[in-house]
Image (cartoon, rainbow, N blue to C red):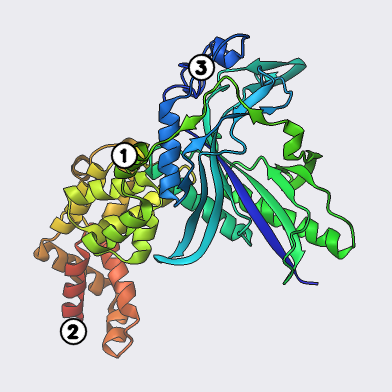
Amino acid sequence: MDFEPVIGLEVHAQMLTDTKIFCNCSTQFGGEPNTRTCPVCLGMPGVLPVANRRVVEFVLKTALATGCTIQKYNQFARKNYFYPDLPKGYQISQFELPIATAGYLDLELEGAVKKRIGITRIHMEEDAGKLMHEINGIAGDSSFVDLNRTGVPLMEIVSEPDIRSPREAVEYLKTMRSIVQYLEVCDGNMEQGSFRCDANISLRPKGREKFGTKVELKNMNSFRHVEKAIEFEIERQRDMLEDGIEIMQETRLWDEKREETFSMRSKEEAHDYRYFPDPDLVPLVIDEDWIAAVRAGLPELPRQRRQRFIDEYGIPGYDADVLTVTKQVADYFEAAVKLHNQPKAVSNWIMGDIMRSLADSRDIASFAVTPVHLAGMIALIDKGTISGKIAKKVFEQMAETGKMPESIVHEQGLVQVSDSGELEKAVQAVLDANPQMVEDFRSGKDKVFGFLMGQVMKSTKGKGNPQLLNDILRKQLAG
Ligand SMILES: [Zn+2]
């Protein structure tokens, strides 16, 4: 039988506010355990939480950017469960009346909508604390609780089960991350856990409406892991269904070392949490003026920026796609082009050498080669001071030392030789040393040209102006 995967994603995005969702404690990552806490986030008896206006604003931004309907009357609810990292014994979240519903995200291919994924709801909630089972890598006989993260604001974005493959899941996440980064409401850092995702996966026979039993997957902290975990889970469920084994509704964790999922617990239902409206927090009423103000303040989003890059800089759609995935890369590109107006050259360097150097970190904002370095280097190529080949060397050294391109070129004498007299001598020397090759070329073997050109470049230590050398070599071979 042919099975179809049905996938829904829940994204937890940590809001980039300075303070927590219901108190004034700092949200900064790290810090001595339990120093960023107060009676409110510690859940002391008698304290009253007060909602952080910025959190609401950030969620409104996201909701408007994803076509959601804003619920003008919404409420915080208590989600009750016991765990040592949850001092109050409940998490303040939203349940029946979330802040936003019925939005969507378009997955695109070269600017055209490929597939629309529905967004069921977006709601606000607080994060729990952190349990530490080992100190300095050593597991003792006790565990420790750090409540610095307790009360850090989160936004949960729940998608419709519209996703049909691991690929689509990753694309959805990348698009969503790009949007929250552009909105500057979340830093999108998956490794540090400020952008997390759970996946609900089930399989059903192709053509059937009814969903199969779903399994929730957790603990995937990179796009690659999301893709692999979902792939694994689809295979696991398919094997079971083919063998006539029933799927259990459960929560499974991804083990990145063994590259498989394993069962954590049987999945709880919503009613297990005994949700009820939080009596300590007044219902949140959002009026039209507030929505209008947030809408008016929305920044340029990835799609719009992509189109502007094509129109304004005349770069291909593919380049615009790559350059606008993150705001940092897009900002970097524009900063470099402002300094040296050669958009396509700047784009090529970013998509090639820069992306390669950054590898997985993708942290272009703290890269040693700044837009000033890059623009300066491309200007040197355009002026003919260095060749494209030498530029690769200069680039490597900029990345290593952070020195400016001009100083690298001068310190190491990398200036391109464009003196034709000098180049002619170099070419003649190579021709004199390879009489057979010259003979071959003149009798029609064009292929040896490449070899001779290589020899000439080598004899000038890569510093000869390649265009000039090419011309001189052709002329001398012809004569
Ligand atoms: Zn606090």
Element class at badge 2: helix
Type of the residue with mark 2 = Ala
**Residue to which mark 3 is pinned:** 31
- Quadrant housing the N terminus: bottom right
Element class at badge 3: loop
User: What residue is drawn where x is 17% and y is 51%?
Assistant: 340
Query: Disc 2 and disc 1: Cα gap in Å?
Result: 72 Å
Please give left or right for residue 235 compared with residue 42 in the image. right
* Camera-side mark, 1 or 3: 1
**Residue to which mark 2 is pinned:** 478
**Residue to which mark 1 is pinned:** 293
Percent of width and height locating residue 126: 56, 27
Percent of width and height locating residue 349: 32, 55
Q: Nearer the viewer, residue 406 or 344?
A: 344
Percent of width and height locating residue 397: 32, 43
Type of the residue with mark 3 = Gly
